[in-house]
Image (spheres, rainbow, N blue to C red):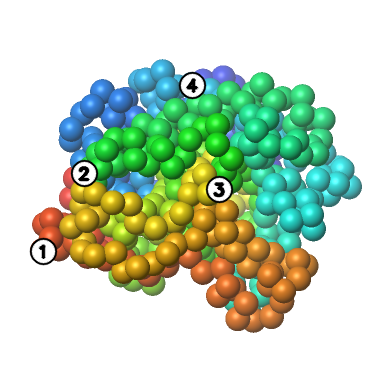
Amino acid sequence: MEMEVGIPPGDPLVDTSYNSGSRIPPFPDYIHTAPLLTISLAKILASNKEEHERLFTASRSLGFFYLDMRECVEGEMLLSHAGSMFSLMNEFFKLPMEEKRQYDLSKKGSYFGYKGKGKEVMDDQGNVDHNEMYNISKDDILAISDPLPAPFIIGSNRPLLQSYVQSNHLVLTTLFGSLSTSLGLPPDTFANLHRFDVPSGCHARFIQVHPYPDLLQQTLGEHTDFGSLSILFNRLGGLQVQLPDSHNWVYVRPVAGSAIVNLGDAMVKFSAGILRSNLHRVVSPPGEQAGLMRHSLVYFCRPEHEAILKRVEGGLIDAEGEDNGEEGVSSREWLERRHLARKIGVGAVGFQRPGDLAKGKGTEGSRIALDGKNGVNTSVVGWDWRCGLMDGLDG
């Protein structure tokens, strides 16, 4: 049963950056969690050398990190917009199911719009997902593509959506610059593959998962993200990552004032495997949180449609040796293949029988070790998975 409870202003259980207005049971302290590095956006913007190095370490080892948005204008702006987006998400999911289904655009070949529960598979056996989603195209919001049909609640909030997209882009450009420099590339290398006004698959996503308080329910199957960087805000647990060199899954604890950021397949391709796109999945929240409706807000950054997903030239990437001759595919082709493989009811390109999920395989397992080349072993980087700790990192 879904819980709805009120809370007075200022209660520490509320992440006020989300304007949630609801009491949230704490994430259980006894739960083993992934020891993600916390990266300060303010320090990155201030050109703090140590913070840039920490970002590079996180992007090579696990490919997930917390990004502390506080104490800088760019981060505080995104936190504020994320709060407003949570309110808009709540209003959207309150719409009657009949109205939401009018904006399921999958049979028209569109990645955007509404997706109901059970419309995608979670695994190669055909078990279906438990998420409702609504994808909002960056190109639609910025009017650089043909407009997509949308409910009034979305169409009437285009100024908010534009602000949210723009604030994400500012943060992403900062991260791309840092990673380019750390790889010994020109600072604008990755940003030039993600120009704001060029068509791409970038989008915002609303996610709603109904509670399963009596069992551990997988709601989204294991996968790597299709694109470049993802910026996630959530208040409840549920996200899990698979630890490197193991089959163990651990929760990622939500942290107030911070986003959870992860790298996707495109960054693995561009960096010749130096950067990591890690497997992750979503299950029921732990402890008392399992009785709550789970909402998540994600901004998925994807390369420009015509960008070719192959290694860029220069810096540490050239030090990996000769290009293996891979021609690469366009970002558009990569995204369409990976997306459609999990879809039900879209014909031969989608999931029809066990084994079909292989059609949507990403960069799982395509890791390289840098040990002996630049002194870093990317498969370990100081992790001790037996105790869940890493020297100098946050847990």
Q: Which residue is mark 1?
A: 372
- Residue 328, how many percent across, how many down? 44, 62
Q: Along the horizontal axis of the image, is 393 left or right of 121?
A: left
Q: Nearer the viewer, mark 3 or mark 4?
A: 3
Type of the residue with mark 4: Met
Q: Nearer the viewer, mark 1 or mark 2?
A: 2
Q: Which residue is mark 4?
A: 77
- Residue 9, how many percent across, how many down? 56, 19
Q: Are marks 2 and 4 in contact (CB under 8 Å)?
A: no
Q: Which residue is mark 2?
A: 184
Q: CA distance from mark 3 to mark 4?
A: 28 Å
* Near-viewer residue (200 or 274): 200
Residue reaching furthest to the right = 98
- Residue 34, how many percent across, how many down? 36, 54
Q: Of helix, strand and loop, which one carries label 4?
A: helix
Q: Are marks 3 and 4 in contact (CB under 8 Å)?
A: no
Q: CA distance from mark 2 to mark 4?
A: 30 Å
User: Mark 3 vs mark 4: which is more N-terminal?
Assistant: 4
Q: Of helix, strand and loop, which one carries label 3?
A: loop
Q: CA distance from mark 1 to mark 2?
A: 18 Å
Q: Residue at x 57, y 59 (%)?
A: 333
Q: CA distance from mark 1 to mark 3?
A: 36 Å
Q: Which residue is mark 3?
A: 305
Asked if one can make out residue 235 in the rendered structure from this viewpoint, the answer is: no
Q: Is residue 239 above or below residue 199?
A: below
Q: Of helix, strand and loop, which one carries label 1?
A: loop
User: Mark 2 vs mark 4: which is more N-terminal?
Assistant: 4
User: Mark 1 vs mark 2: which is more N-terminal?
Assistant: 2
Q: CA distance from mark 2 to mark 3?
A: 25 Å
